[in-house]
Image (cartoon, rainbow, N blue to C red):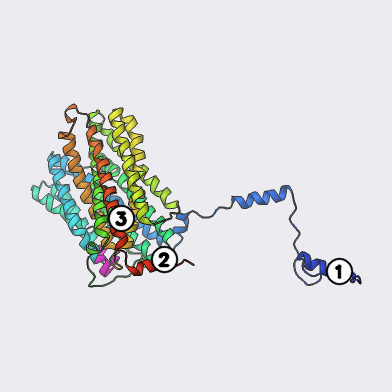
Amino acid sequence: MPTPPPERAHASKRRATGAPPKGSGAVTFAAPPRGRDQSHQTRTRRRTHTPTPYRTLFRTPGTRAFTLGNLIARLPMGMFSVSAILMIAASRNSYALAGAVVATGLAATALVVPWTARLVDRHGQARIAVPATALACLGALALIACVHWNAPDWTLFASYAATATVPNTGGMSRARWAHLLKDDPAALHTANSFEQAADELCFMLGPVVAAFLCTTLFPEAGTLVGAILCMTGVLVFAAQRTTEPPPTGRTTSRSPLRTPGIPPLLAVFLATGAVFGSLEVVTIAYADAQGHASAAGVILGLQAAGSCAAGLVYGALRVTGPAERRFRRCLAAMTALMALPWLTATTTGSLLFLAPALLLAGMATAPTMVTAMSLVQRRTPEGQLNEGMTLAVTGLLGGIAGGSALGGWVVEHGPGSGAGTGTAGFALPVAAAALAFLIASAQHSTERTSVRPSERRTNSRPSH
């Protein structure tokens, strides 16, 4: 076999090794040295991390601005009730009157907020949220004036009831995420987890800020600052028009209450609200019985902190499988963890051990609420998302009110109430969580058969 010329041999060798031809003008790169330099490059590459789900979430233009406005507007949601109680009690020297006024406002909110959400869906968030918030702030200012000038008691009820027009800012924020991330379920899961963590954070900080303002400055300071923050936040939120879902206008669609799958979810929200309401009252009563009533806020703050942390971690996870299955598992975990405060209070009788038990118990609530809100988003008809999520929040508020009332009755008249320990009341959150789990489990077979054929075809379509 004849030997090729040297140049052709070198060219063949260059082609075999992938080197560029000599004199072709191509830039040649030296092979990376082996040994310590190569291991340094490997370590450098390993240090390069992919962005976290939350950092990726807020890369979408406009999301940071509407989130900032929403957080400012949402903080007063945890301030108004405590501020009103402290303000009225300081002026009229009656916690019974203060509690009745707040309960009336809560009932009015449960009736009015779904209608406000329906108007938001029809006409747009900015067009409805701003005047509705302005009316609610006027009600708060009227309450301050009535308390300050010692107006008749009925004016307090009327003024605080007017604050029920405040829109559900959390629901509007979730509707924006659902609009922006409708083609990215994983990112929407992260967004819902962030919103739930924001809820927990605001309801954890709100009472603390309200108590500080009312006791340090003057009794009306909490309500006044809350009204200013609420109006400012809604104005900032509404100004972000690029991320706002388009209004649907007047439609003939029936209420989400009549949509299959929504009523059982609302029943679960009622039972879950009873978990929160009863746990709050029972914990306060238990701390008071131990002679440390001032520690109740800190202990309940740990429960909210555990929920907030769990919500953020849950949002960073990549969830798999049907949401209905995850929902039942979350409810089962919440039932099990809610038993920890009960067992701790019964066996130890110590606030020091109750605090970490409540921290652990709170870790199941945020994942449960995140999954529940995801199911509400999936089952609510298109164009009615604000109304559907507001109905869920209304169910939660109703459960909180009922749980608070039942928890107070058990503390005063239940087993062991005469001893002043109040440990029997900790069984209520466990029972309410178990009831929520039973409702979700009982509806499982019904939900599977109620899925429309078109949805089955969509779910069975292979992903690309």
Asked if one can make out residue 237 in the rendered structure from this viewpoint, the answer is no
Residue at the spot 34% in from the left edge and 31% down from the top edge: 353
Q: Would residue 124 be counted in the magenta stretch? A: yes
Q: Quadrant of residue 416?
A: top left
Kind of residue indicated by mark 3: His
Q: Residues within 10 Å of mark 2 (few under 14, many from 20)?
A: few
Residue 114 placed where, x, y %? 22, 60
Q: Label 2, on which residue?
A: 460
The label shown at residue 200 is none
Contact, CB < 8 Å: mark 1 with mark 2?
no
Q: Would residue 123 be counted in the magenta stretch? A: yes
Q: Label 3, on which residue?
A: 444
Magenta residue span? 119-130
Kind of residue indicated by mark 2: Ser
Asked if one can make out residue 319 in the rendered structure from this viewpoint, the answer is yes
The residue tagged with tag 1: helix, strand or loop?
helix
Residue at the spot 86% in from the left edge and 69% down from the top edge: 9
Q: Earlier in the sequence, mark 1 or mark 3?
A: 1
Q: Residues within 10 Å of mark 1 (few under 14, many from 20)?
A: few
The label shown at residue 9 is 1
